């Protein structure tokens, strides 16, 4: 079997995501395929760290409710055994490669894209109980969620409640949100609020993310915000729910992905960076007491 090049890997990953996006509308009801991870939370390594970038999307689309993933060897080290016949999920990583210039002797490091397989904890027997947490459940009835509200407040973003549209205005550095009561579900409200918070991170003094002012740049920024919202919902233990206006962005997202097999890698990386920035703004109870 021929060895996959970096371009092959990017093309395969991009094509799989395009297929999922196109398939998500086949029944006439739009749903974002990477929102499925809300069933179990943010994809997590065996050491408890979250996956980042495009690997989050790959694992979110794999269809498992359990957030925990590991390699075959990691499962064995934990006393587990991958069940016979189970198929791993291919994820990617960048491995630095040192190249020496023959003429000058100078060395430079370039990132090489590699792949490996991981297994979901639900594919593995005899793992410790902590790798089988209770799945996140849908909020019964519409209600505010204190820890999510605290997360938003801790960012210190200015959020005004007005009108019937949600948006971030860079000129005034303000987010506008419709009243909570105007949303159909709790998840709908928080998915939308977190989407706008990801937009809020794009300015220079935060994540410095300028993806262009044309239609393509706008589509890329919307994709980053959509991914970032899904990542944050999973981190916060809520079942992610696509906004009602996501369907209108589908064609532009697909155009971006079909034109550039690196686009989803860049968007996912920037979404992870935005989510991490917002996480870093959180204030612990101890810090609040000390302040």
Image (cartoon, rainbow, N blue to C red):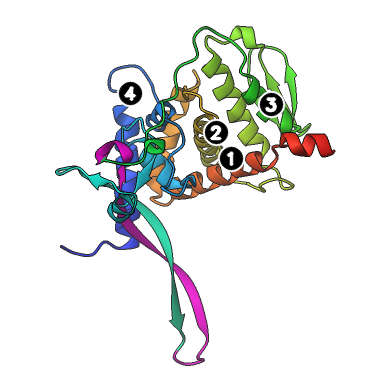
The disc label shown at residue 232, or none: 2
- Where 146 falls versus 50 (above or below)? above
Q: Which class describes the residues within 10 Å of circle 4: few (<14), some (14-19), or many (20+)?
A: some
Residue beneath disc 1: 275
Residue drawn at the location 70% of the way across and 21% of the way down? 176
**From the viewer's perspective, is the residue at label 1 or at label 4 nearer?**
1
User: Which of the pair 264/70 is nearer the observer?
Assistant: 70
- Where 129 falls versus 80 (above or below)? above
Q: Magenta residues, as a range?
A: 102-124
List x then y, in percent, for residue 72: 27, 52
- Where 34 falls versus 280 (above or below)? above
Q: Earlier in the sequence, mark 3 or mark 4?
A: 4
Looking at the image, do the residues carrying marks 3 and 4 touch, with CB atoms under 8 Å apart?
no
Residue drawn at the location 56% of the way across and 39% of the way down? 221
**From the viewer's perspective, is the residue at label 3 or at label 4 nearer?**
3
Residue beneath disc 3: 150
Residue 286 lies in the magenta stretch: no
Residue drawn at the location 19% of the way across and 42% of the way down? 83
Looking at the rendering, which quadrant does residue 179 occupy? top right
């Amino acid at each position: 079997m021929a060895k996959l090049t970096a371009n092959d890997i990017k093309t395969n990953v991009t094509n799989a995501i395009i297929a999922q996006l196109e398939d998500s509308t086949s029944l006439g009801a739009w749903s974002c395929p990477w929102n499925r991870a809300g069933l179990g939370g943010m994809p997590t390594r065996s050491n408890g760290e979250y996956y980042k970038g495009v690997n989050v999307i790959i694992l979110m689309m794999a269809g498992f409710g359990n957030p925990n993933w590991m390699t075959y060897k990691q499962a064995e080290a934990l006393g587990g055994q991958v069940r016979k016949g189970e198929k791993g999920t291919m994820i990617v990583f960048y491995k630095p490669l040192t190249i020496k210039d023959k003429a000058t002797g100078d060395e430079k490091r370039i990132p090489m894209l590699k792949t490996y397989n991981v297994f979901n904890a639900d594919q593995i027997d005899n793992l410790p109980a902590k790798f089988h947490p209770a799945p996140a459940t849908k909020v019964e009835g519409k209600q505010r969620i204190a820890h999510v509200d605290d997360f938003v407040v801790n960012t210190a973003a200015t959020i005004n409640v007005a009108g019937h549209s949600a948006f971030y205005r860079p000129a005034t550095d303000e987010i506008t949100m419709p009243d909570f009561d105007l949303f159909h579900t709790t998840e709908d409200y928080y998915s939308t609020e977190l989407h706008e918070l990801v937009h809020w991170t794009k300015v220079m003094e935060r994540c410095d993310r300028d993806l262009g002012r044309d239609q393509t740049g706008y589509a890329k920024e919307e994709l980053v915000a959509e991914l970032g919202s899904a990542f944050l919902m999973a981190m916060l233990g809520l079942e992610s729910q696509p906004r009602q206006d996501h369907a209108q962005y589908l064609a532009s997202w697909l155009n971006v992905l079909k034109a550039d097999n690196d686009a989803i890698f860049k968007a996912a990386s920037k979404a992870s960076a935005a989510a991490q920035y917002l996480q870093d703004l959180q204030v612990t109870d101890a810090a609040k007491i000390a302040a």
